[in-house]
C-alpha cells in the first residue's frame, strides 16, 4: 500500500501510521517552463530569452493526494484536526513510498470534501512543490 511520508522540522510523519489514512489517488503535475519571448518592435521577429542562462527554468508543480480514513467517523475528525494543525500552510519534505528514493519540497494546503450528510469522507492534500524532486542520498541535496 502506498503511503505519504511528510517531514516537518526534522520529524517524520506517516499518513498511514500516524493519521490512519490511506491514499486513494494522487497526481503530480509537470512543472511549466517559464518562457520569456520578446517582440522586436516594428518587425515580425521575436527573441526567445527562455534559455538565456543556458537552460530553461520552471514554475512550481502541484502534487494532489486524495485520502480517506481507515478509522470510524468519530476518530476521523480527530485525525483531520491533527493533520490541519501539523501541516496546513507549512513547508515540508514529502516522500511517496512508491518512489521512496526521492522527495519533494513544498508547502501544504488541505481541503476537506464533505458529503451531503455533513460527514467528512475524503480530504485532498495539496503540495505546491519545487519543480524538481530531489534524491535523498545525493550529497548536493539536503538530507531529510
Image (cartoon, rainbow, N blue to C red):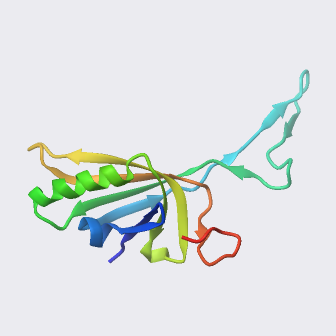
Q: Is residue 45 left or right of residue 68?
A: right
Which residue sits at x=66%, y=69%?
A: 141
Q: Position of residue 60 (x, y in %)?
A: 59, 49
The quarter of the rendered structure image containing the N terminus is bottom left
Which residue sits at x=30%, y=64%?
A: 24
Q: Position of residue 18 (x, y in %)?
A: 28, 68
Establish if 20 lies above or below 1. Answer: above
- Closer to the camera, 77 or 70? 77
The quarter of the rendered structure image containing the C terminus is bottom right
Q: Is residue 9 left or right of residue 13?
A: right
Which residue sits at x=42%, y=46%?
A: 89
- Closer to the camera, 40 or 117? 117
Q: Position of residue 6 (x, y in %)?
A: 42, 64
Q: Position of residue 116 (x, y in %)?
A: 12, 42
Q: Residue 105 sits in which quadrant?
A: bottom right
Which residue sits at x=68%, y=49%?
A: 33
Q: Is residue 43 left or right of residue 122?
A: right
Amino acid at each position: 500500500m502506498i503511503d505519504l511520508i511528510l517531514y516537518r522540522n526534522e520529524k517524520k510523519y506517516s499518513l498511514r501510521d500516524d493519521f490512519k489514512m490511506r491514499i486513494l489517488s494522487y497526481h503530480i503535475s509537470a512543472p511549466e517552463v517559464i518562457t520569456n519571448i520578446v517582440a522586436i518592435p516594428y518587425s515580425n521577429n521575436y527573441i526567445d530569452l527562455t534559455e538565456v542562462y543556458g537552460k530553461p527554468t520552471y514554475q512550481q508543480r502541484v502534487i494532489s493526494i486524495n485520502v480517506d480514513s481507515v478509522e470510524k467517523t468519530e476518530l476521523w475528525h480527530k485525525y483531520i484536526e491533527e493533520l490541519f494543525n501539523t501541516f496546513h500552510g507549512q513547508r515540508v519534505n514529502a516522500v511517496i513510498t512508491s518512489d521512496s528514493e526521492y522527495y519533494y519540497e513544498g508547502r501544504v494546503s488541505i481541503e476537506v470534501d464533505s458529503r451531503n450528510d455533513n460527514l467528512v469522507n475524503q480530504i485532498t492534500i495539496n503540495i505546491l512543490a519545487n519543480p524538481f524532486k530531489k534524491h535523498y542520498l545525493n550529497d548536493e541535496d539536503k538530507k531529510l
